[in-house]
Image (cartoon, grey):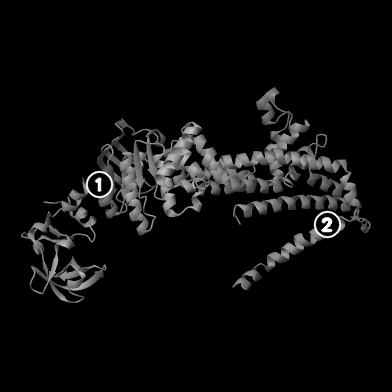
Amino acid sequence: MSITVRDVSKSYSARRREPVAALRGVDLDARDGELIVVVGPSGSGKTTLLRCVAGLEQPDSGRIEVADRDVTDLSPGERDVAMVFQEYALYPHLSVRENIGFGLRARKVEAGEVETKISDAAVLLGIEETLDRRPAELSGGERQRVALARAIVRAPAAFLLDEPLSNLDAELRAYMRAEIRGLQRRLGTTALYVTHDQIEALTMGDRVAVLRDGRVEQFGTPEEIYDSPASTFVARFIGSPPMNVVPMALLADGDRGFAGIRPESLTTTAPGAGRLSGRVIHEDALGHEVIVHVEVGDEVLLARAAKAVAPGLHADTGLAFADADVYRFGADGRAL
Amino acid sequence: MARRGGSLAIPYAIGLGVLVGLPMLAAIALAFTEFTGIQAPRFTGTDNFSRLVGDEAFWRSLGNTLVYIVIAVPLRLVVAIGFALLLHRRERGIGVARAAVYLPSIVPDVAYALLWLWLLNPLYGPLALALGSYSPDFLSDPWGARIGIALMGAFQVGEAFVIALAARRMIPGPLYEAAAVDGASPWFTLRRITLPLMAPIMALLALRDVILSLQVNFVPALIITDGGPRYATTYLPLYVYRTAFRYFRFGYASALTVSLFVLTGIVIYAQYRLARRYRLI
């Protein structure tokens, strides 16, 4: 089942203040069974977009389709979508069993069928033991699974996930990333997944939409986004550490626009041996490697270096790179 | 710091002792005496309490009080929670509406009772004129009077309304959004989310209202119905008042007061247990 978002705009107005545009003509489509990650910094409009698709916000203009059905003016319950909220939104007074079955009971599904579906969902998520507990008695990971079980139990046309892993610790987050992706693939349900974490975006998405100030800056596969960023914004936002974006003249021919190079494409060399020379002003030691901050003229460039060959703090160093690894952007920040 | 904080409570503690504690002790002491206010109190042991057990008027006024509680408490609770649910959203003009709900609670009791005396008047009261022959006989029929007195209390729900409003606003919005996406109807959401999550506060409000209802009906019963018709609105406070100040039986009135105090104490204890159970205190 596909999701289509066409030219959707949404602004918020507060009393005695100018309206703030949260979405400006957003176009997006998720094909049947795809997981689309919507990524962007805080305030980029990604959660507003998800809420518009869910029906929790009404767009000012544009059109939203779920499973080839225009749902723009339908209530959330009529859209056949399920949502996983950032804070899980589990009903605190209901048991896990009642939480999972809530949507089915609301839709007057027959009691026996409700129980069967709850059991199936619980088995799928591995939470059979917790069915009679309340949300307050569960760990963060278990709550996350209950929220997922509540979403899948209705077999909706699409899943909408709003930063579902942001409350988990790093280890559990990595585990749940794989779990959610695996579950979504197994069920074959189309999903929109909102996150500010670019690692989640790159590892989970079939395609990734990068949002900035309410607009889709780039929409493509993770490889396209990483290898061919459409703008300096995408280049800086995707990748860790981010791409170095400096005035064109520093890395390439030309005096207008910007040039970008990923830290892993810069190699530290003996002083004077590389194409650039600078001094190490800071190091981020990551164990097996070091992120070296090199001051070159007025710019600071980040380079990845193996721990054994890292030049050391305050040392002079050279930087080598291949022309093929240099990205070129115009003065407006768009890729050339 | 804690000691200094405690010392700040001294003026209140003195006031409480002099204005509440001493009269209470005096009432308990008087409950074991015969005292007309003219001669000195005469110790009679537990005579007043023995007489109370066989006093038909006492049981009738206690029964009236319980009837009042049974009618008025659910009514007041439904009104307070109903308004809280209607007016919990931040909308233009909502402050005016909330103030309007609170307003009857700050009208002086006597003025409010006189207003209702007019509203319930069977000849020229607006209710009687509006309902015509369908109008219950609020002041001259026993059940009409009981319902009338309970009805007027249903609009003085300011404090319960504010508490219910706060309780409703404490329920996280995403729960309602999750329910909406789940396809829950407003009625299903009310039954399965709102009311269960407000239940502890509702139970506390109900118990608080029971305590209030043991006393609050004194002014309307005195001014509107004078305890009638046929003693139908002679509630415990009015019976205590008449025993003391119409028949000058201060000792017996004190015994009645002590019985009211014990009744209130039991309700407060239940309230305390409930608050502990739901970790509200």
Q: Is B211 displayed left or right of A274 in the figure?
A: right
Q: Are marks 1 and 2 on the same chain?
A: no
Tell me the distance, in whole angstroms, between the alpha carbons under discs 1 and 2.
78 Å
Q: Is residue A256 above or below residue B146?
A: below
The image shows a total of numbered marks equal to 2
Residue type at mark 1?
Ala
Neighbour class for label 2 at 10 Å: few (<14), some, many (≥20)?
A: many
Give the structural element (helix, strand or loop) at label 2: helix
- Quickly name the residue at label 1: A209
Q: Position of residue B240 (x, y in %)?
A: 82, 48
**Residue located beneath label 2 in the image:** B27
Q: Is residue B158 visible?
A: no
In the displayed structure, A329 sits above or below B154; it is: below
Horizontally, is B7 left or right of A190 in the view? right
User: Dividing the picture into quarters, in which one does residue B19 lie?
Assistant: bottom right
B232 with respect to A140 (left or right): right
Q: Which numbered disc, 1 or 2, marks the residue closer to the eye?
A: 1
Task: Look at label 2 and name its amino acid.
Answer: Ala
Residue B146 visible in the picture: yes
Picture coordinates of residue A247, whole percent (x, y)? 13, 61
Q: Circle 1 sits in a helix, a strand or a loop, which is it?
A: strand
Please report contact status of discs 1 and 2: CB closer than 8 Å, yes or no.
no
Query: Which residue is drawn at the image coordinates 82% and 37% (left, top)?
Result: B231
Identify the residue at horizontal 90%, vertical 49% (top origin).
B50
- Chain under disc 2: B
